[in-house]
Amino acid sequence: MRIAELANGIWLSLVLTFAVVSAAVAQERLTAYQGAWLPGSLDCAEIYASTRSGLAFKKPVDIFAPAFIISGNRLTTPQASCRIKSIQPSGDRQLLVLGCANAVAGDDVRILMSLQSDGLLKRYFNAEDSSGTAYRLCSR
């Protein structure tokens, strides 16, 4: 019995260590994505307002604005709030798995993104999308 308890303790330690390391790696991958993002055709001041903790969606919120804010492990749009569950490399892109909720429902969402050398962020609709939608950073 003692050996089984010891083995379970070692297994639990390994699982917890893996979880902590995985969370740290995911957070490191998210560092470059932090901030308020908006397509190039819109003005940041029309969508975002400054707050003590950074930018937030301007009130009243334009629910149709194609904008989002990444802060820590949260991605927020005008209509939904998401927890970033994981981020993994997928070729030259990053696959983010989000747990999202809005006023009506909650669901898991997968998105593909990549940072460009010019500082833009591109979001892709699927793996076959070669052009993506470009977003620029309004503020960190």
Image (cartoon, rainbow, N blue to C red):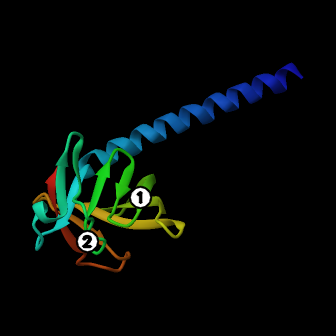
Residue 22: x %, y % from top left: 47, 41
Q: Residue at x 59, y 33 (%)?
A: 16
Query: Does residue 9 lie above or below 54 as drawn?
Result: above
Q: Kindly identify which residue carries mark 1.
A: 81
User: First in sequence: mark 2 or mark 1?
Assistant: 2
Of residues 102 and 3, the one nearer the viewer is 102
Of residues 80 and 136, the one nearer the viewer is 80
Query: Does residue 64 lie above or below 38 as drawn?
Result: below
Left/right of residue 73 with respect to residue 66 in the rendered view: right
Residue 88 falls in image quadrant: bottom left
Left/right of residue 117 with respect to residue 92 in the rendered view: left
Circle 2: residue type: Pro
Q: Kindly identify which residue carries mark 2.
A: 66
Q: Given contact means CB atoms under 8 Å apart, are the residues at marks 2 and 1 in contact? A: no
Query: Does residue 2 lie above or below 27 as drawn?
Result: above
Q: In which quarter of the image is the N terminus?
A: top right
In the displayed image of the protein, which residue is found farthest to the top? Answer: 2
SS at mark 2 in the image: loop
SS at mark 1 in the image: strand
Q: Residue at x 26, y 49 (%)?
A: 34
Distance, label 2 to label 1, CA atoms, is 14 Å
Circle 1: residue type: Ser
In the displayed image of the protein, which residue is found farthest to the front? Answer: 60
Residue 37: x %, y % from top left: 21, 60
Neighbor class of circle 1 (other Cα within 10 Å; few <14, some 14-19, many 20+) is: some
Residue 98 shows which numbered tag? none
Residue 51: x %, y % from top left: 20, 45
Q: Residue at x 46, y 60 (%)?
A: 97
Residue 105: x %, y % from top left: 54, 68
* Residue 140 shows up from this direction: no
* Residue 35 shows up from this direction: yes
